[in-house]
């Protein structure tokens, strides 16, 4: 038995961090969700914005004095 499905933004972020293309994110995650067009477009823009962001584990933390 599997747990609840993570929300789409979390799935999108994970897919992009694994190197999945924006086109595949749309085809595999967004299109099957059958969202209203405004929600689909908002999540597509989210994916586009996240695509160019470094993974959280790759962000350096810098402390200064």
Image (cartoon, rainbow, N blue to C red):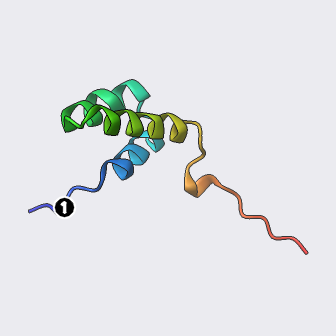
Identify the residue shown where x is 28% and y is 35%.
30
Residue found at the far bottom of this picture: 65
Residue 4 locus on image (x, y percent)? 18, 61
Identify the residue shown where x is 42% and y is 29%.
22
Residue 40 locus on image (x, y percent)? 32, 35
Residue found at the far right of this picture: 65
Q: Is residue 2 left or right of residue 13?
A: left
- Front residue of this view, candidates 48 and 59: 48
Sort mark 1 into few (<14), some (14-19) or many (20+) by Cα contacts within 10 Å. few
13 shown above or below 62: above
Identify the residue shown where x is 39% and y is 40%.
43
Q: Is residue 10 left or right of residue 48?
A: left
Q: Quadrant of the N terminus?
A: bottom left
2 shown above or below 25: below
Q: Quadrant of the C terminus?
A: bottom right
Identify the residue shown where x is 41% and y is 38%.
42
28 shown above or below 8: above
13 shown above or below 25: below
| Label 1 SS | loop
Residue 57 locus on image (x, y percent)? 57, 57
Residue found at the far top of this picture: 23
Tally the numbered discs: 1
Query: According to the image, label 1 marks what residue?
Result: 4
- Front residue of this view, candidates 48 and 65: 48
């Amino acid at each position: 038995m599997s747990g609840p499905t993570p929300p789409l933004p979390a799935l999108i972020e994970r897919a992009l961090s694994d190197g999945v293309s924006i086109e595949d994110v749309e085809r595999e995650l967004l299109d099957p969700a059958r969202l209203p067009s405004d929600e689909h477009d908002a999540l597509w823009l989210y994916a586009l914005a996240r695509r160019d962001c470094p993974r959280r584990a790759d962000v350096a933390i810098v402390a200064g004095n």
